[in-house]
Amino acid sequence: MKSVLKSCTAMAVILSFAGQATTAEMLTKLGDGEGQVDIVAWPGYIERGETDPAFDWVTKFEEASGCKVNIKTANTSDEMVALMNEGGFDLVTASGDASLRLIAGKRVQPVNVDLVPSWDTVDDRLKSAPWHTVDGTHYGVPYMWGPNVLMYNTEVFKEAPPSWSIVFEETDLPDGKSNVGRVQAYDGPIHVADAANYLMANKPELGIKSPYELNEDQYKAALDLLRAQRKLVSRYWHDAFIQMDDFKNEGVVASGSWPFQVNILKSEDQPVASTIPAEGATGWADTTMMHVDAEHPNCAYMWMEHTLSSNLQSDLSVWFGANPSVPAACTDGRGMQTAEGCATNGFEDFEKIKFWQTPVSKCESQGTCVPYYRWVSDYIGVIGGR
């Protein structure tokens, strides 16, 4: 099933670039809600108190709006693109490596920010971010952002690992045992960027300026590193909950991860912590985007407005260990987050994070780069041992 999904996803990626972004007609006036809204979302992004009763930003919205929230969880950006290409959804919480593909593929429609009353509260660094804004037209509402962290077992690592090398190169860990079979890697082509980010710092002679803009030599070096990593990896993870189980029960001690997994494992008193090593990190800035054929546009706009409420942004920031797109959520006391919590989550590190984006053939740093469809097919080959 996984191989079938990957093949379908790869085709969806290719097809999503077939069209050019055009400005579809956007809504100019809202009407009554249609009774439901169907959303594709990352794990942990839309909670109704089922995982933890303290975190529920769905129930009150449903009661106030009359719009039932239906959630389809997707574990990778490519799954999100495939689902949006398939249709039947109103909204998606897209990361930067999916959002421009969705715009280019005409799968999402422009968003009329005048119909989102809280738009002015959005972080100025995000309002016109290039992953959801094309030629001045907004194709979504910023939701949440943060880094891809290195999660590690604190019983093995008494101090935070200083480098990503522990998941890329064979070595003995502080407990004297090899890292072979004890680390994981992300099950998505965007992981090529993590390898490139590591090489930026450790092989400067390659001249990599952006982990998303690689010429043929740089790309080959990244693939070679990933092929070596394959010998170390016990599992390529894409399901956050399976990764957490692997840390608890399968002897995994280090992996790239999200703050979401770190926070849940800590809440269960598991011996884990996270760090951003010396090489820095890739990251994600996610946008709520609206399908071009959304069947419930009024409920969709109501939900987008709801996502900008500072109490939702605050609680989501605590729950996921990420940063709100509404800065006031860090300090206004309407939710659980605090200024100290936002500082811990790296609110001031925005400029240091290399946010996910879709690699294209024409790139700023060197003119011609390896496009994303190559990343897709080649990463499938890496996982398959080729």
Image: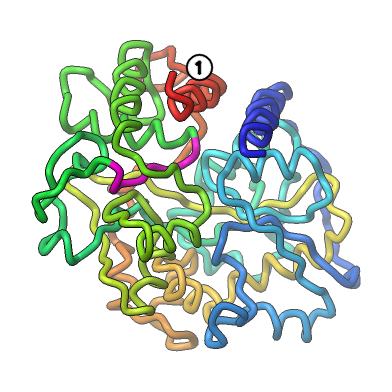
Could you tell me if residue 104 is visible in this image?
Answer: no
Rendered position, 69 above or below 351 = below
Residue drawn 74% across and 32% down? 22
Secondary structure, mark 1, is loop
In the displayed structure, 33 sits above or below 368; it is below
Name which residue lies at 80% across and 79% down. Answer: 65
Residue to which mark 1 is pinned? 361
89 vs 378, left or right, is right
Does the stretch in magenta take in 4? no
Q: Mark 1 Cα within 10 Å, few/some/many (few <14, many 20+)?
A: some
Looking at the picture, does residue 178 appear above or below residue 119? above
Please state, as top left, top right, bottom left or bottom right, where the C terminus lies in the image: top left
- Lateral position of residue 112 relative to residue 197, left or right: right
Whether residue 93 is situated above or below residue 55 in the rendered picture: above
Res 5 visible = yes
Residue 60 on image: x %, y %? 70, 85
Question: Where the N terminus falls, by quadrant?
Answer: top right
Where is residue 126 shown, x and y percent of the image?
48, 54
Q: Residue at x 73, y 52 (%)?
A: 290
Q: Which residues are magenta?
A: 181-188
Question: Coloring scheme of the render?
Answer: rainbow
Residue at image coords 32%, 66%: 345
Instruction: Find residue 97 and report its horizontal and vertical position in percent.
Output: 53, 39
Q: Is residue 187 magenta?
A: yes
> How many discs mark residues in the rendered view?
1
Closer to the camera in the image, 281 or 134: 281
Question: Which x, y percent locates residue 269?
Answer: 32, 79
Q: Amino acid at mark 1?
A: Ser
Residue 265 sits in quarter: bottom left
